[in-house]
Amino acid sequence: MSDSKIRVSKGNQAMADSEAVLATSRFIHRKILVRLFLGWLSLSLVIGGLFLWLELERIKQSVHELALRESAIFNGESAHNLDRLDSAAYQQLMDLARQLVNQHFLVVELYDRNKQLRLEIIRPGHELAEQDINRYRHRFPKVGEFSHEFHYIRGELLLVILVPLRDARDSLAGYFEGVYQVDRETRDSIMEDLGRRLVFVTLGITFTTLLMYPIVLTLNRGLIKLSGDLLKGNLELISVLGCAVAERDSATNSHNYRVTLYALRLGEAIGLSREQIHDLITGALLHDVGKIGIRDPILLKPGKLTPEEFEIMKTHVPLGVEILSKSSWLEGARDVVEFHHERYDGSGYPQGLRGEAIPLNARIFAIADVFDALTTKRAYKEPWPVLDAIAKLERASGSHFDPRLVQVFATIAPGLYQEVSGLDAYRLEAMLRRRIARYFLATAIGAGVRDA
């Protein structure tokens, strides 16, 4: 290779590495932002909810005290024996009750010690409110205790209060029950104050979260660099293995990159998870890794293999599985390596699996592999037009390929081919690195990013 070509190759490789590092950095930045947003949301909900509950309890207590203060006119020296009321006492109690109804109470009721109703007065025009909350009333407390319940009915904040009444000797004289209405001005003031406090709490959490972003980012600079190096190392490891096979098999690096891109895009189109796509990518790049162990006279034979030679060729599948077994990190590639020669009708090898018994990643890769083989030039053939290649896949749908996957691939194949055709190995590698960075990072360092 000439010096100029070497310089171009190194330049393209450096560009691919730079783009991979940039993709890694963007991925981690997005992860940090997402985690911080989720943390902000969780804190806002938890702290805001706790604050709201405490504020509502404070408001309830304040309203309760207001209601008790007004109802206290029936206690002490003003208390009457509600079991035996004469006309004068009854009139006096009616006057006191009207006084409360003219202030904040919608309903006032007095009960004797036996919990029998002795007096009731309702503010004119509020009979419906009395009916709405009737089911919450008449829950008499134990001696010496209070009872109160808040309700928001017809746009009004109401407090149902039940208070034991005491005479001058602190003996139980009866019970006071009332429906206390929080006036509109007080209610609006309460809501405005509550809103302001919630806004301040939320702003405090927001500013704290924003301040954490540069701190977390600074702490994770080493992680970003390590992640970029990890991604680069992983891809180089896979590429070295894949390219070593390609060199022995008279194929090209470009085939590995194209078929991986095709498989990746098909996997995305059907909604595979990150982990599944990570395994699909690794399997696609290493699909024929077992051919390293096939002897040259068979692997490089230009003509058709004899039945005996073909049986030897098929051993590249278990050889590939054995190679992958040496690395737990490459274990996810096994589905593609072991089963990409299976056929949908069960006529493939090594196990003769049928239909969906074939792992999904292997079914995806089989389509991508044949499509690339048909549309690229080989020593023994010219490239097929894209539409002819798609038609070939459709004819083999149900026999060689999964019909559902062929249907999806047929819709995206023309655009994919136009996108990658004509690109050299370095540009294909750069494109591949950009697209797969998030999948490799999500599985290889996902735990580290989550901890961040």
Image: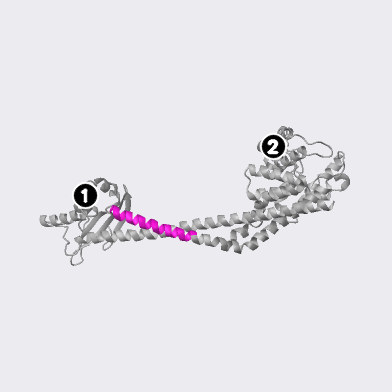
| Main SS, magenta residues | helix
The residue where tag 2 is placed is: 414
**Could you tell me which residue is drawn at 68 percent across and 56 percent down?**
21
The answer to if 184 sits in the magenta stretch is: yes
Q: Position of residue 26 (x, y in %)?
A: 62, 54
The residue where tag 1 is placed is: 123
Does 216 sit above or below residue 248?
Answer: below
The residue under label 1 is which amino acid type?
A: Arg
Judged from this view, the residue extending furthest toward the right is: 297
- Is 356 left or right of 186, judged from the image as shown? right
State the residue in front, 59 or 89.
59
Label 1's element? loop
Cβ atoms at labels 2 and 1 below 8 Å apart: no
Q: Can residue 359 be seen in this view?
A: no
Q: Where is residue 190 in the image (x, y as percent from the top left)?
A: 34, 56
Number of numbered discs visible in the structure rendering: 2
Does 415 sit above or below residue 111?
Answer: above
Mark 2 vs mark 1: in front? 2
Q: In which quarter of the image is residue 160?
A: bottom left
Instruction: Magenta stretch: give its range.
Output: 183-206
Does 358 sit above or below residue 34?
Answer: above
State the residue in front, 95 or 141.
95
- Is 212 left or right of 375, judged from the image as shown? left
The answer to if 74 sits in the magenta stretch is: no
The residue under label 2 is which amino acid type?
A: Pro
